[in-house]
Image (cartoon, grey):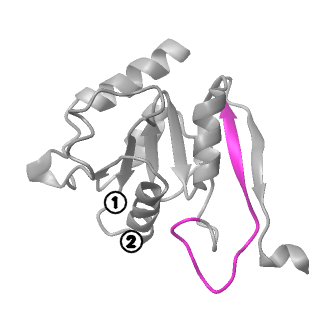
Amino acid sequence: MKLIRTLAILALAVAPLGCGAQDGVAPRATETAAAEPASATQQPVLVVHKTPWCGCCTAWAEQAQAAGFDVELHDHDDLAPIKQALGVPMSQASCHTVQVGNYFVEGHVPFEDVHRLLAEQPDALGIAVPGMPLGSPGMEADVKHSFSTNLVKADGSIVEYAHHPGDDAQR
């Protein structure tokens, strides 16, 4: 299963997805990131797959940059093939899908959870914040809803990875 997932990630990284610079890929957020050698402390690039009309996905990507990540944006009309190739369960789907290292990051995941994933390197497919909870990164509002970041294990099982209380937790 891990080999198939790794091959799928490689295929997405090198195969034309109909999103070359002339067909809708937003420019690399940091053009120098690919040319510089990676250091032991440098985070891998977050490859953000999103639809061209989603402003909250762009807001999440901008916040990822502010949190110290290099970000590469790719616009697609249909994210379903990408989600499927990376192993994102339908129950965990959100508006954008990120590839980072050998993992997916689905939706409006807080950056401390992404840092934790990369530091711990669990035997997993990725992490997800299903839906689009108000108050999550990129979904700022006057109210913050409680939400969880879920870990999708390599065997497909799903467990809570982190809980983020909101204003509604005080009621």
Farthest residue, direction right: 171
Q: Give the x, y percent position of residue 84.
A: 46, 37
Cα separation, mark 1 vs mark 2, equals 9 Å
Q: Nearer the viewer, residue 100 or 91?
A: 100
Asked whether, in this view, residue 111 is left or right of residue 31, the answer is right
**Quick check: 33 left or right of 80?**
left
| Within-10-Å neighbours for mark 1: few <14, some 14–19, many 20+ | many
Q: Residue at x 64, y 86 (%)?
A: 142
What amino acid is found at the position of numbered circle 1 in the picture? Thr
Judging by the rendered image, the residue that carries numbered circle 1 is 51
Residue 100 in the image: above or below residue 30: above
Whether residue 91 is visible here, answered yes or no, is no
Q: Which mark is residue 55?
A: 2
Which residue extends farthest left? 22
Query: Quick check: 154 left or right of 104?
Result: right
Magenta segment: 137-153
Identify the disc placed on residue 137.
Answer: none
Say if 82 sits above or below 141 in the image. above
x and y percentages locating residue 60 in the rendered image: 46, 62
Against 75, residue 145 (above or below) is: below
Secondary structure of the residue carrying tag 1 is loop
Residue toward you, 34 or 161 = 34
